[in-house]
Amino acid sequence: MNKHRYLPMTDEDQAEMLAAIGASEIEDLFADIPPKVRYQGTLRMSGAMSEPELLQHMKELAGRNRDAERYTSFLGAGLYDHHIPVVIPHILSRSEFYTAYTPYQPEISQGELQAIFEFQSYMCELTGMKVANASMYDGATALAEAAALASAATGRSRVLLSSTVHPEARAVVKTAARGLGLEIVEIGYCGGVTDLNELENMASDEIAAVLVQSPNFFGCIEDIQACGRIVHARGGLLVTSCNPLSLGLLEAPGNLGADVAVGDAQPLGIPASLGGPTCGFFAVSEALMRRMPGRIVGQTVDKEGKRGYVLTLQAREQHIRREKATSNICSNQALLALCASVYLSVMGKAGLQEVAKQNYCKARYAAGRAATEPGLSLAFEAPFFNEFVIKLPEGTSPDDLSAKLLQAGYIGGLELGREYPELAGHMLVAVTERRSKAEIDGFISEMGAG
Amino acid sequence: MSDIKENYVYSREHEWAAKAEGQIVRIGISDHAQSQLGDIVFVELPQLGAKVDAGDSIGSIESVKTVSELYSPVSGTVRRVNETLLEQPELINEQPYEGGWIAEVEVEGQVGEALAALLTAEQYRELVE
Amino acid sequence: MKPDKALIFEMSRPGRVAYSLPECDVPECDASEDIPVHLLRSKPAGLPEVYEVDVIRHYTELSRRNFGVDNGFYPLGSCTMKYNPKLNEEAARLAGFARIHPYQPEESIQGALELLYTLQQDLAELTGMDQMTLQPAAGAHGEWTGLMLIRAYHESRGEKRTKVIVPDSSHGTNPASATAAGFETVTIPSNSKGLVDLDKLRAAAGPDTAALMLTNPNTLGLFEEQIVEIAAIVHEAGGLLYYDGANSNAIMGIARPGDMGFDVVHLNLHKTMSTPHGGGGPGAGPVGVKSRLIPFLPKPVVSRRADGTYYWDYDRPQSIGRVKAYYGNFGILVRAYAYIRSYGPEGLRRVSECAVLNANYMRMRLAPYFDVPYPGICKHEFVLSGKRLKAYGVRTLDVAKRLLDFGYHPPTIYFPLNVEECLMIEPTETESKETMDAFIDTMIQIIREAETNPQLLLEAPHTTIVKRLNETQAARKPVLNCTCG
């Protein structure tokens, strides 16, 4: 293996460089590794392939997955099959963006810095919050960071968590809570939305925050304003998680009393990619600005007065504050934040409203069809955005139904039994702007004929 | 050469302390400390009413690329903080001993006793030079 | 002077569009009949109104104001800015990887599961660990996950261990992750050789020690020669060893953390495994453990049945739970897998050999012009001190800014914190001798400039689209969004 297309070292280079170092062989450069821990022999790992072989192999592996280009997907549950505007992959393929590191040298990173500044601006526009950061790993980890922020800001350690928040986000919050010593109290749901009576009962002067998601995991729209009133009366913070695409139709959380608004930007032009990488966003009220985790870009001027951008408020961060940092986050999801920004640039003011409206209308149509289809019914009456829960015919085997739907060319919704045992035999169905009336009709018929 | 006020006393962590009215001790950071930090961009002020022991961390001072803890040089209760610093943190750079004061702490015992534990200007000069 | 680059918001003209959607083919519906009016958007989000050409030109212009590995040499120490192979990008964009959903039936994603399973096995073998989780999204996320595993392990044995020891040269993420996992950090100073001071470690280790976090080679690019003794000290105290894999590019196929005594490791696939840094992310930070920690791994892990099919294994009652939604940054994992298969084990060993040879070559050639705080062979990176330039009123920052004028990304500066006026250089294996020679010649020229015309450095950069930016103003009066909507 002395020749490889990514490695420039020739035998001659190697000889010259060793001579310059004063070493006789490469082995000399590893003389500081104790023999006891030197690895001998060849690792038992997957073997090398040439470029054409490897390309073929990757295509073969990919070909064994049923993807949303070949199948008609009604699966959402946090990751949605939206149209990805054609310009997005072109822009994201600019290697000046994707082969750069975090913009530590602002003079040669103005492109990325401006892109992040625009992303922050977009997130503020969508959420109605005062400031936003450069992104988080995903919506779930953003929610966990929000719980941590709320605890630090209030000096309290009890956090109320609605059970209509995405189950995986709740799981991440709980893992994080164990590390931080937070107490998580789950609030039940009623008719598909957070039980406000229970929330009222559980709210006390010890709560740091309530964490609520809207549209929630069932697709239902929560009254986050009412949640805010309850938690604010007790001196806690309102943390909301939202689908950014829904904000073309639904009120901005910042206008409904949210102190922290987080979510996942996946609906904004990011492919589902088996769940990652996506992009978490994190926006807060002005009072919480300096408690935000992660990178933040600010506008400034250069010494000639020209507008420019830099990473700022860095004293919050791990590389300066170490164990006292607001968070340990270092890498974020910059390239996906760029993706979301390009999406919002393409959709613009009118497009975002239009796409949100189409999602809403198509989901309403599908729900209407399901409600009248023999054997099917709707689980909840609460208004929803682009996703809703269908009660399947008695005795339906979820595995059999999935298989049957795949056979017919559909990727079906999510059966809820594992996360919500009381909802076994129910399916969470998402309908995006990509679904046509004919596809919806076909899918609902296929489910009902069960 | 940094400015060291003769009639003030100092901690090894570079805070200054000076007697104000009654039981009140005013505190800030020394000229030496501000010049080491560089341009100060934000001050996390102590909590009003907090009971502190000498040597406790009661806030922090941020410059662009570093952050420094603020330790209370005396024990007592935080009675006032300099809220002007929230808008104009540069006052610490410009007038560390005057407009850049950070907090006032009410001590319980003798003010003189509390200050006696700290370095005199002369001792502090030896420390930083 | 050219005017400022416009923000996309400033390019907006009412009435322009860049999107195209089909006519809605279901009946129109009125949201206000259904959704309470206070929950409906009262004022549309202030997004720009531009057309497609604006979008393309805007982002193309932004890309031209950015510098990546594809633009030139990027010797940013600790970040392993190696070439990002294009095949890996192509592979990750295949619809069979990009357009699949984690909640699809397992039988409909067998190709993806096989890839994940094989990657788990390969990374475990590479690091000498018994099992991996691919869930963490980045290095720091991996650190935190690993520390949560360590915490769960100690708790399962009924032990309350509260302290994590880190050397003073450690990455800032180490202590920050320890805090997030509920531990107190104990920082120990390095010895005069830049290595862990065994006496200090002995003094710090005790019944409250949960773990020692270590990078090996460390952040100075030095191999911890006494790693076996270090491991023994920590293990005898009942603590575990955590391996920060940020510097794994030095030792692939040459030494394995598992053989050194480490119990938990993370790898930064965006460093060692060539996945692109993306301007700050996404990355991936898989975590590997020795067998005694396997029960605590985040769930699910990918497992293989006797019949050769793959599945998500959720049946893990002692698991710490989830650390991220779904199964990790799959798109990054696809690229890492393709990278491993483009080299194979012998190729990866050659990668590390070349990375180390390149670093030592640069170190030898630059040594006469700087102070070398830790002489002797280095691994994949090395540190220099620019302190002698202070005599000319020049600091390391100025050297870095002057490098911009020559078309280079500067090395990491002012890290690690225990080296004065530090420059940390990591060439990686994908740079040629000519590239390194040209960079070295430039560095020598800059030193000469510092001696003869320091102003040239103090005012640098001269050729970039913006000059040095006022970071004080940015932090004192933060302007964090354009509020132009």
Image (cartoon, grey):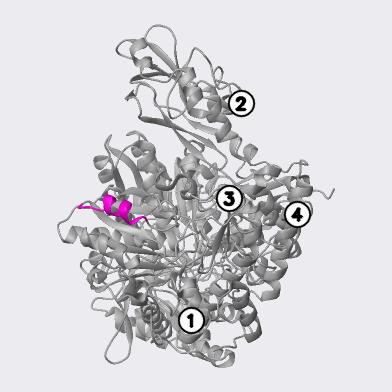
Magenta segment: C197-207
Residue that carries the numbered disc 3 in the rendered image: A120
Residue A398 is left or right of residue C330, and the answer is: left
Three-letter code, disc 3:
Gln
**Chain that bears disc 1:** C
**Residues marked 2 and 4 touching at CB (< 8 Å):** no
Question: SS for tag 1?
Answer: helix
Residue that carries the numbered disc 1 in the rendered image: C349
Label 1: how many Cα within 10 Å (few below 14, some 14–19, many 20+): many
The Cα–Cα distance between marks 3 and 1, rounded to whole angstroms, is 42 Å
Q: Is residue A174 above or below residue C221?
A: above
Residue that carries the numbered disc 4 in the rendered image: C448
**Chain that bears disc 2:** B
Q: Are marks 2 and 3 on the same chain?
A: no
B87 or A43, which is in the foreground?
A43
B67 or A406, which is in the foreground?
B67
Three-letter code, disc 4:
Arg
The Cα–Cα distance between marks 4 and 3, rounded to whole angstroms, is 42 Å
**Residues marked 1 and 4 touching at CB (< 8 Å):** no
Image x and y of residue C321, in percent: 29, 63
Residue that carries the numbered disc 2 in the rendered image: B1
The Cα–Cα distance between marks 1 and 2, rounded to whole angstroms, is 55 Å
A323 or C190, which is in the foreground?
C190
